[in-house]
């Protein structure tokens, strides 16, 4: 059953969640909107396009302690970090939720599942906010997404102007709405308006023709276009660290007052040192190999393993790249190339 | 000036003076340009020149072999001077296409005032930007939306150039370039610390600042040293502050305040509040300017017998040097 | 703050002058606060800002770097290079709000045992007044 809540009552609904759970929502910090833990419903800021960085660090922290060893030799105590409490992330755009499903598929696959990620993930309820006004950098519809899609979300809010339409898709989502008298049932008019908004939002996004891109890339590994396209890339990590689907990490042991922490932390395949081996050899010695890696991984390798691209069209890399490297431009160029032009 | 730049680039390539010209091309987003690498005459029409040309293209120079032509604003040219003085670029391998500059636009200032720039028609006019959209056309004076580094710029004219495109600029900006630094200096220590914790706390350790900076060219950055590891690579606040502190330290006497770092930062951190201080320290402690002429002594690589040492602990009554 | 807290100061002393001066203080039975731990370096110029910053991050309450008097450096000009470096480091640390009184620099010659003890006393007292170091200290 779809519900509707008047905007001025939303803060109270959220306050109810805060009583029993940690709640993260978009909030204002230094001129930017970022996901932060909020102490009261009034702090949630839901008038925004998208955050500069996704809420990824809630379920996949940028710095994660795997264990701590304390004590002197022979007397080592191993401490594993406490698990996550019940957590709600509010204001997740459909693209970011779609990205979570990509991470779920990866971390949950194979014989050795990533228990660290999964144990955090199962404590999290994702509450989405449908996009009525996609940005000029959005391209979710080109990679199998949609500004109102429900994939990955436990519940979704649709902004109808003076009120929100709420739909709970899972039990977890439903639990957030149970027992609250702040909402009324949705009526035909609400549903109709939401549908209109969805149509309008979809039409606002320029759709790129990327059908068959994964196969096309099979024949383009040696293409000279990679060399040309990566010239301006500076090899920083902005695209990686603002991307909701990137997950590469590095590990290290760090000294802390109590002893040693083994941590894992985000790394980027765009860094020159990412693949440098102890011997000094680097299989990806230049920007060409690294940029090719990024595109191939997202649009070919992941596609082969999981049946869909590892890109959700959120456009953050486009917005934030210091040299305006535009992945949309890159993909369109790749689509326009003859297959196997530079095959071995 | 755009036509002139293309003309110069075409001539350089045609006459074989360079194998490559680096300049600015049209970006895919409003108020953005993008670095452009031209290897033959026909490509020069991609080159543009407008107030969105912010990136410091000199950051590409250290890694390029062969002869290069490069479009350089005043600040960019200063960083080229430092690169040559530090032996990272050979003078005879670079043809500097110098462009006197009145400042580049800070697109974030425009966005903060106007919200999204999607679906707007943006054109540049003399010292102004014209924005046309659903509402009547607005004409914004460029001066109100300049990158902070440009507001108080003293390097409008390139100190080094092989060709100068456009008229030299004679007027001073008239703005105290250290006003923000002075503001911070006047805060009590506790407040200063909280300011930097807050500002640098948003850092996601993406290193866009480092990569955008032409003077951060070390093949192995101190961040990546593991034998020994000086500090951590994560967003732990202590590690993050140390990264920025030491980067500023490494740029002392070298940073020309082009603003590329601040412009590149995805979290909009005001990195200049730190780097500009190093320039002030150098001026006040050592009275040295840099990035202005070839053959200058490197500030932190030289010393004077009478360098200030007011900080030396004297130790009791016998306190004599 | 633990009332038993004693400041811990790490001291980088140049081998030829300051370390010898500290040694002389010891031989002459001159008393000075036991709060310092000495690291011997060939020259004050060997002390990279990394050492100082890492010490602060590791929780040392204070740092002392001591070298030969200007003009007397065993390596001719090491201490002069170091002098520039330290001025900048102190200014920058102070600017970001770190207690710059924690980072100290001195000239102590091999003959100045008494002076060394005075420098140490002055530094330890300065650091004691600042309390335990909090800025830049890496938490778990």
Image: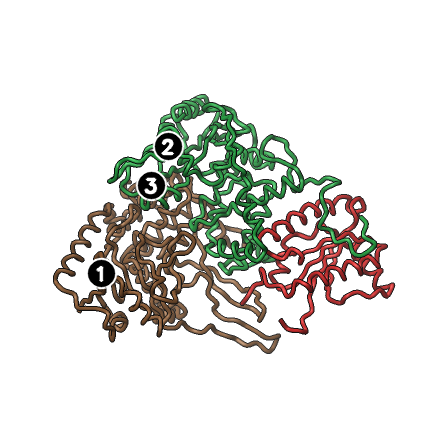
Q: Which residue is mark 2?
A: B128
Task: Tell me residue B124's x, y (percent).
Answer: 35, 32
> From this viewpoint, is residue B36 visible?
no
Pinpoint the chain carrying mark 2: B
Q: Nearer the viewer, residue B101 or A116?
A: B101
Chain appearing in green on the rendered image:
B
**In this image, C49 relative to B27: left or right?**
right
Is residue A133 toward the left or the right of residue A236 in the image?
A: left
Q: Which residue is under mark 3?
A: B29
Q: Is residue B280 left or right of residue A188?
A: right
Q: Mark 3 — on which chain does it sit?
A: B
Q: Secondary structure at mark 3?
A: loop
Q: CA distance from mark 2 to mark 3?
A: 18 Å
Q: Are marks 3 and 1 in contact (CB under 8 Å)?
A: no
Label 2: which secondary element: strand
Work out whether A200 lies above or below A249.
above
Q: Colour of chain A?
A: brown
Q: Colour of chain C?
A: red
Calculate the distance from the C-alpha at mark 3 to the C-alpha at mark 1: 33 Å
Foreground label between 3 and 1: 1
Q: Which residue is mark 1?
A: A163
How crowded is the residue under tag 2: few (<14 C-alpha within 10 Å), some, or many (20+)? Answer: some
Give A140 or A285, whichever is nearer the viewer: A140
- The image quadrant that residue A324 belongs to is top left
* Residue at mark 2 to residue at mark 1: CA–CA distance: 41 Å
Residue A21 placement (x, y as % from top left): 36, 72
């Amino acid at each position: 059953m779809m519900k509707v809540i008047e905007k001025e009552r939303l803060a109270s609904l959220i306050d109810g969640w805060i009583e029993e759970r940690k709640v993260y929502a978009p909030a204002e910090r230094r001129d930017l909107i970022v996901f932060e833990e909020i102490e009261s419903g009034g702090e949630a800021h839901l008038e925004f396009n998208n955050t500069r960085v996704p809420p990824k660090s809630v379920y996949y922290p940028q710095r994660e302690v795997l264990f701590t060893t304390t004590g002197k030799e022979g007397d080592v105590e191993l401490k594993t970090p406490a698990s996550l409490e019940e957590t709600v992330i509010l204001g997740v755009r459909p693209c970011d939720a779609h990205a979570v499903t990509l991470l779920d598929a990866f971390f949950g696959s194979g014989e050795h599942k990533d228990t660290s990620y999964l144990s955090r993930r199962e404590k999290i309820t994702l509450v989405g906010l449908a996009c009525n006004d996609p940005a000029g950098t959005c391209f979710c519809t080109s990679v199998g997404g949609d500004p109102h899609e429900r994939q990955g979300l436990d519940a979704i809010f649709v902004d109808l102007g003076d009120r929100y339409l709420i739909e709970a898709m899972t039990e977890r989502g439903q639990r957030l709405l149970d027992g609250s008298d702040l909402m009324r049932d949705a009526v035909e008019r609400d549903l109709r308006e939401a549908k209109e908004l969805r149509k309008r939002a979809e039409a606002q996004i320029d759709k790129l023709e990327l059908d068959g891109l994964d196969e096309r890339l099979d024949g383009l590994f040696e293409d000279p276009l990679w060399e040309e396209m990566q010239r301006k890339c500076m090899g920083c990590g902005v695209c990686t660290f603002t991307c909701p689907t990137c997950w590469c990490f590095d590990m290290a042991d760090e000294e802390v007052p109590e002893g040693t922490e083994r941590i894992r932390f985000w790394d980027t395949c765009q860094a020159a040192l990412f693949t440098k081996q102890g011997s000094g050899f680097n299989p990806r010695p230049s920007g060409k190999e690294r940029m090719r890696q990024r595109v191939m991984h997202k649009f070919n390798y992941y596609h082969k393993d999981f049946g869909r691209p590892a890109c959700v069209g959120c456009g953050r890399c486009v917005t934030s790249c210091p040299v305006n490297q535009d992945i949309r431009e890159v993909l369109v160029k790749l689509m326009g190339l003859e297959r196997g032009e530079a095959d071995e | 000036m755009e036509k002139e730049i293309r003309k110069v680039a075409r001539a350089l390539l045609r006459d074989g003076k360079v194998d490559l010209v680096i300049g600015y091309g049209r970006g895919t987003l409003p108020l953005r340009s993008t670095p452009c690498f031209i290897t033959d005459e026909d490509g020069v029409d991609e080159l543009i020149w407008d107030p969105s040309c912010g990136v410091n293209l000199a950051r590409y120079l250290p890694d390029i072999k062969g002869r290069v032509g490069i479009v350089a604003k005043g600040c960019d040219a200063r960083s080229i001077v430092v690169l040559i003085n530090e032996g990272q670029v050979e003078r005879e391998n670079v043809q500097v296409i110098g462009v006197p500059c009145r400042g580049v636009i800070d697109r974030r200032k425009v966005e903060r005032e106007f919200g999204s720039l999607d679906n707007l028609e943006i054109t540049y006019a003399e010292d102004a930007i014209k924005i046309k959209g659903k509402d009547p056309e607005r004409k914004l004076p460029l001066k109100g939306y300049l990158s902070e580094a440009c507001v108080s710029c003293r390097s409008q004219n390139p100190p080094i150039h092989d060709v100068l495109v456009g008229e030299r600029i004679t007027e001073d900006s008239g703005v105290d370039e250290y006003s923000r630094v002075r503001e911070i200096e006047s805060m009590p220590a506790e407040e200063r610390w909280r300011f930097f914790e807050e500002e640098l706390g948003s850092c996601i350790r993406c290193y866009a600042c480092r990569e955008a900076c032409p003077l951060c060219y070390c093949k192995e950055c101190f961040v990546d040293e593991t034998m020994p590891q000086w500090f951590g690579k994560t967003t732990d606040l202590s590690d993050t502050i140390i990264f920025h502190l030491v980067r500023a330290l490494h740029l002392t006497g070298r940073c020309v305040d082009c603003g590329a770092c601040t412009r590149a930062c995805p979290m909009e951190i005001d990195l200049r509040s730190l780097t500009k201080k190093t320039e002030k320290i150098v001026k006040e402690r050592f009275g040295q300017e840099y990035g202005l002429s070839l053959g200058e002594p490197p500030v932190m690589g030289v010393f004077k017998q009478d360098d200030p040492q007011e900080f030396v602990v004297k130790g009791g009554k016998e306190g004599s040097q | 703050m633990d009332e038993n807290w004693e400041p811990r100061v790490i001291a980088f002393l140049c081998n030829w002058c300051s370390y010898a001066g500290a040694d002389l203080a010891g031989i002459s039975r001159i008393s000075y606060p036991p709060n310092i731990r000495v690291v011997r370096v060939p020259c004050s110029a060997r002390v990279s800002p990394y050492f100082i910053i890492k010490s602060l991050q590791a929780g040392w309450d204070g740092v002392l770097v001591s070298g030969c008097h200007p003009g007397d450096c065993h390596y001719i000009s090491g201490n002069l290079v170091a002098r520039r470096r330290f001025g900048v480091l102190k200014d920058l640390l102070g600017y970001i709000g770190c207690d710059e009184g924690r980072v100290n620099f001195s000239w102590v010659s091999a003959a100045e045992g008494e002076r060394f003890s005075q420098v140490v006393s002055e530094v330890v007292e300065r650091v004691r007044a600042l309390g335990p170091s909090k800025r830049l200290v890496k938490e778990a």
